[in-house]
Image: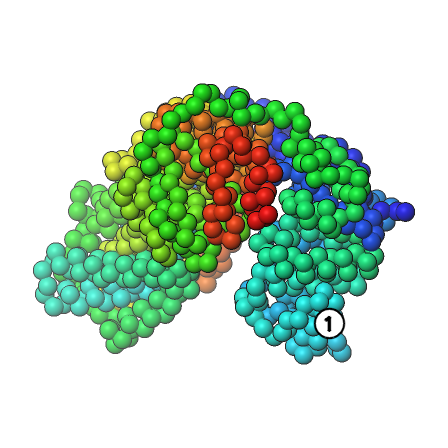
Amino acid sequence: MTATLELRNVEKSYTSVRALKNVSLAAHPGRVHALLGENGAGKSTLIKIASGAVRPDSGTVLLDGVPMQLTPRSAKAAGIRVLHQERQIALTRTVADNVLLDGPTPGRFGLVTARAAAREAAERLARVGADLDPYAPAWTLTVAQMQLLELARAVCAEAKVVIMDEPTASLHRAEIEQLFRVVRQIRDSGIAVVYISHHLDEVMELADDYTVLRDGAKVAEGLVADVTPPALVGHMFGDEVSLRREDVHEGNTSPGDVAVEFDDVSFGGAVRSVSLAARRGEVLAVTGAVGCGSREVALLAAGALAPTSGTVRVHGGRRRGRRAATAAGVAFLPADRKREGLMLDRSIVENALLAENGLVRAPFYHPGRAAGRAEGVCRRLAVKMADVRGPVRALSGGNQQKVVLARWFEVDSDVLILDEPTAGVDIPSKFEIYRLLRQCAAEGRAVLLFSTEYQEIRCVADRVLVMRDGRIVGEIDGEHATEHRIFELELGA
Amino acid sequence: MHTTSTTTRRAASAPARRIVTPAVREHLQVYVPLIAILIGLCAIASANNDAFLSAGNIERMLVASAVLGILAVGQTFLLVGGQLDLSVGSLVSVGSVITAKLVLGNVPSALVLIIPIAVGAVVGVLWGLLVSLLNVPPFILTLGGLAVFASIALTLADSTPISVPDGLDWMQGDVLPGLRGPVLIWLLCLIAGGVLLHFTRFGRNVFALGANEEAAFLSGVATTRTKILIFVMNGALCGLASVVITGRVSAGDPRAGVGLELMVIAAIVLGGASLAGGRGSMLGSLLGVLVLGVITSALTFLNVPDSYDQFVFGAILIAAVSVTAVAEFRRRRRVRLRA
């Protein structure tokens, strides 16, 4: 049987990272193909190639056995539909407008009436079993309803392949069941489904075939019926993991005073009654599925959000706002480096001294001395660069991340709050960052690591807090924080 | 052919690369073409008429450019910080009428200077607060202000210029030998603004605000305060500019500032600033103002009818922005290839 969508020997490199190494994948009609792998394994690059957003360096993409040069337009025309992890919903528009985002079918004289559009949208919603008012504004929908809306948009007459990226993130069990029913229905209508998920139980339940990526290479593939969850975990994380806890942990550190304390903190519906204490000299990891509230906890700890109830204390005192927290020594490394971390168009110097700019009261700025300070701190963190006055844009992901970290070392912060510090970072840099975090703890700093990478947590953390639905549902000792233990707590098993 | 020229250029610039840092090169990319335009314009105009580069005409050009130059200092801070104030033209008109009324009311001359500046600063506080606390885009907000202030200026002055025969004499003669009042004020603003933007923490924060407000906020930069302060500074400079323009034309004209907002922004963008923020320099803005000033004078010397002025301004702006955009595209691609 010809595969609906086939990627053959696809390669892709970004500035300094080889994102995909000779990967092949075939999605067949009427089957669900699970794509598995850790963060940064190359899944998103693969999706981008399949949807025409990124052109591979080499290799071919075949649709129904015909080689194609995909662009976003031609991919769509060929029936490839992607449901991205970030919902593509225009919140201020109606449900009908959102379902028909690609353009409604025009009626007489090529005109579109609101009524005809609503009818068409309702039909497509019905096809995925969603009973939504086409005239309702999209912001009134729940996350699960938005998910169904996106499916209704994807599943149209010409759809041949539907790619779903982490569709169950932030869905409840009952909502997941409904989603699965729809996915099976789509599959049975002869569409090829590519399903990306971290959740192995979902994969076991739903998928027919699987492919596992690790560090950009395909490490396993086959029939789901022939594989067990432990075997899949083995493939995902590797048996001979290059980074081990022992490599990073050098002797035990003894925790000191409480540096960051949450006392019954809530934030809207996202964080509910969280209490925690992070001490100097330890790395406290907080993890959980996307939407579990850990990101909000990070922002609360950094002072960038104010709790709706409860108190956050840093070194025993309440700090109002991000600036007060910075002055109290709280560093924050945001998850989205490009949007929240870096001034991409500015130099390495300016990026490395950004926190100093906010803190130092001395009015004058001496460009030459500034470059010297920036160079010093970048050296300490082993940033590989040609010229410290050069653009930060030219650095690799790992080195860019080190520059963001450098700005906090420059002002000697003693509480580090890190949100996904190694997202999009190459392996050697990851290793350096892990060592750096342990070194910070050894020097008596408090490190709060917000991460969804299990291997990272196991390597670096002294204690692990697992969150689900805005609550802390369990604490695990760092040494015993295996993927399975964390999975169990995340899923509430 | 194309390949050859690229290769030669590379070879020529290769040894210089070590001395010229990336930041300096970025600035030179803006300054060199502007300086070339200035020289070119002067050459053409003085070839046509020797008097163009006479001391008298240079002085006239500088005096004529002073108001635009002072406004450009304040607006540069805004554009670098990713903000914008379109109300400056009308605000100058209001300020000019107020100044005239103060002079005619025999108010002490120190207050004639201070009150318009204070009025401008208050307007700046208003913009700063609205923009940062309500999170309203400054474009629409200050566009509203442009209309409102234009109307206020006309109402205050009964739609006719108020003649100020004397009282601002120091604005017309030389304050220092060879240095006219408006030019001295411009020069002082320019130096203070340049130091503030490029050699102080505050200036770095303005760049950070424009380059990535989110990153700056998360790194502990006082983004709200910085934003309000640059609007206040800009407002105060508008007040100062309105005193200068009133003194220069000896009248409080309720239409004194019509169209100035676009001229200012054009000059600053010519000088390498980006409307997206995080880019620009005081020296660049100065060169932009000088280019516009020289064009105005050159067109007069070349006997080009007034109706062509706007065409030439517009064409130069479009050309400059296109050239910058192409250079920027090439630069990014080169960065990506090299990495």
| Residue found 80% across the figure and 51% down from its top | A31
Question: Tag 1, which chain?
Answer: A
Question: Which residue matches tag 1?
Answer: A123
**SS under mark 1:** helix
Q: Residue furthest right?
A: A1
Percent position of residue B193, x then y: 29, 44
| Residue found 68% across the figure and 32% down from its top | A234
Q: Amino acid at mark 1?
A: Glu
Residue B81 in the figure: left or right of residue B7: left
- Between B124 and B75, the one nearer to me in the picture: B124
Query: How many other residues sit within 10 Å of disc 1, few (<14), some (14-19) or many (≥20)?
Result: some
Percent position of residue B24, x then y: 43, 32
Is residue A9 visible in the rendered structure shown here?
yes
- Between A423 and B239, the one nearer to me in the picture: A423
| Residue found 43% across the figure and 58% down from its top | A268
Is residue A445 visible in the rendered structure shown here?
no
Residue B41 in the figure: left or right of residue B53: right
Determine whether B23 is above or below B320 in the image: above
Residue A108 in the figure: left or right of residue A489: right
| Residue found 72% across the figure and 65% down from its top | A128
Q: Residue furthest front?
A: A493
Residue A359 in the figure: left or right of residue B98: right
Percent position of residue B139, x then y: 42, 61
Q: Quadrant of the C terminus of chain B?
A: top right
Q: Quadrant of the N terminus of chain B?
A: top right
